[in-house]
Amino acid sequence: MNNKQRIAVLGASGHTGGFVVAELRRRGMTPVPCGRTTDLDVALRAADAVINCAGPFVATAAPAIEAAIRAGIPYLDVTAEIEVVADTFAAYAGAAVPIVPAAAFYGGLGDLLATAALGDWPAADEITIAYALSSWHPTRGTTATGRVSAQRRDGRRIAYTGGRLQHLTGDAPDTSWTFPAPVGQRPVVGEFTMADSATIPTHLDVPEIATYMTRNAVQDLRAPDPSAPVAVDAQGRSAQTFLVEVVARSGGMQRRAVASGRDIYAVTAPLVVEAASLVLAGEGASTGVASLGARFDAKAFLGALSPRHLTLG
């Protein structure tokens, strides 16, 4: 990949968009920043692909996808909005360009880990995704997106059970989960469903996806006035650490995959840029909608991000 590859970045001035722009430059690619008032048809004429980092994605995903289709270039986004991911798969399955939704920490990473965990299994009885965050200082975009999603759900939760995404009422279950060292046993909130519960079932045969998030992170996210991430290093990353454990169960057997690292927003950039780079190189470049786990060799993809961005367990 070289600087002749031009990648349009919607939401380039945002928190995650800034990490994506920096990652593109680090790889020798040329980012083309696009704002909310940018004429996409004009901007995408000279682009080789587009990465959408502009949430809430319920407002930006469809127009950006349509513009990418008109331009004949791949579209990728970093949405964590479950409904948007589901809508994208439903509406653009027959698109004439590659479309990769949720190529991010929420959505893409869990999808890759689940795919790697299943390996040669044709199916699983259940997949569990457990997130441990040392803290969660949401960006303004995350906060705005959360408000939009909450309005769409009208106080209900979403869970993947019985082979489909379902809306649930009542309080989410409180329990505990024993993560690999050094995290160990932590209080968690169950049914904390993220975008990977929308991507995984599109290519893995599983009727149940259980999800957990450490309680401290949920409390941070739901604080009345949550503080934003604060950069503590030269790359702009916060001090936040994460560990994601995925466990696949089938017929009394189980397999697991684990990834840990620093700053959920910062790690989104190498995930989506690696995907864009591979698609432009012809790997996983089939047209229509497909997730990271469906498009790529999951173990190889994760390995390409280790150890610079992820520690794999």
Image: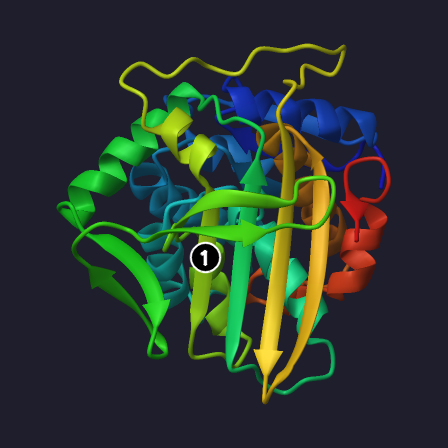
Residue 99 location (% of width, % of height): 53, 57
Residue at left offset 56%, top offset 61%: 291
Q: Looking at this view, is 146 or 162 the one in front?
A: 162
Q: Is residue 188 visible?
A: yes
Query: How was this image coloured?
Result: rainbow
Left or right: 165, with 263 as reference point: left
- What's the residue at 62%, 48% (across, down)? 244
Where does the N terminus fall, quadrant-wise? top right
Residue to which mark 1 is pinned: 211
Q: Please rate how many residues cluster around mark 1, counting C-alpha atoms within 10 Å: few if below 14, some from 14 to 19, many from 20.
A: many
Closer to the camera in the image, 32 or 178: 178
Which quadrant would residue 48 be assigned to in this image?
A: top right
Q: Residue at x 37, y 29 (%)?
A: 219
- Dividing the picture into quadrants, the one containing residue 238 is top right
**Whole-percent x and y of residue 177?**
53, 52
Most distant residue in the left direction:
154
Residue 107 lies left or right of residue 279; in this view the side is left
Does residue 289 appear in the picture of this structure? no
Pinpoint residue 139: horizontal percent, then vertical percent: 45, 21
Q: Nearer the viewer, residue 70 or 63?
A: 63
In the rendered image, the vertical position of residue 64 relative to residue 294, given as above or below: above
Secondary element at image label 1: strand
Q: What x and y, as percent, mark residue 41? A: 45, 37
| Residue at image point 73% right, 83% down | 120
Q: Please count the marks in the image.
A: 1
Residue type at mark 1: give it.
Thr
